[in-house]
Amino acid sequence: MEKGNPCLTCGACCAFFRISFYWAEADDVTAGGVPVHLTRKLNDFRRAMISIDGHTPRCIALVGAVGQRVLCSIYENRPSVCRGFEASWADGRPSERCDRARAAWGLAPLTPDAWDSPDDEPKAA
């Protein structure tokens, strides 16, 4: 029986870290980029995903309930910072950032057996 992707039942990273990236990743500059209407300007070089600001920011593109079932509504157009985020044990190693986001949402750290195989790539969240 396949375990599936644990990121699809998590989403903590998308609801814990501010998601900021180089401004030219937005679709007003780069075809197929991050939808600019879902971003805000931080400075002359950086944009950020619109979020519910506060103690636990949540990316506007995150759909679902953190810790239950989630997906990224712009997965194919997500920014590089999201593409580069490493979930714990997805590559055979723990991730302090993943563990910290999960802890903030009251979720236990992922373990190596959460993945079907060490080279499964997170597909959403």
Image (cartoon, rainbow, N blue to C red):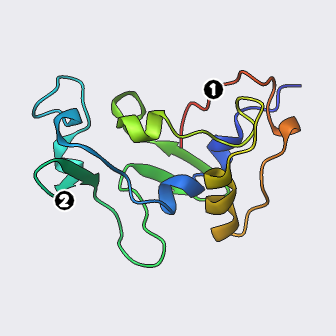
- Write the residue at 17% across / 22% down: 31
Is 50 or 103 nearer to us in this picture? 103
Q: Quadrant of residue 59?
A: bottom left
In the rendered image, which quarter contains the N terminus?
A: top right
- Write the residue at 64% across / 69% down: 104
> Which amino acid does the dot numbered 2 rest on?
Leu
CA gap, disc 1 and disc 2: 30 Å
Residue 52 appears left or right of 119: left
- Write the residue at 71% across / 43% down: 88
Q: Tell me the tag on residue 121.
A: 1
Q: Tell me the tag on residue 92.
A: none
Residue 65 appears left or right of 112: left
Query: In the rendering, at what x and y percent does residue 11 appear?
Result: 57, 52
Q: Is residue 87 visible?
A: yes
Mark 1: which secondary structure?
A: loop
70 to 33, vertically: above or below = below
Residue 47 appears left or right of 97: left
- Write the residue at 17% across / 32% down: 27
Query: In the rendering, at what x and y percent does residue 60 appear?
Result: 35, 56
Q: Which residue is mark 2?
A: 42
Query: In the rendering, at what x and y percent does residue 34 appear?
Result: 26, 37
Mark in front: 1 vs 2? 2
Residue 43 appears left or right of 2: left
Q: Earlier in the sequence, mark 1 or mark 2?
A: 2
Q: Is residue 105 visible?
A: no
Label 1–label 2 contact, CB within 8 A: no
51 to 112, vertically: above or below = below
Query: In the rendering, at what x and y percent does residue 22 appear?
Result: 24, 41
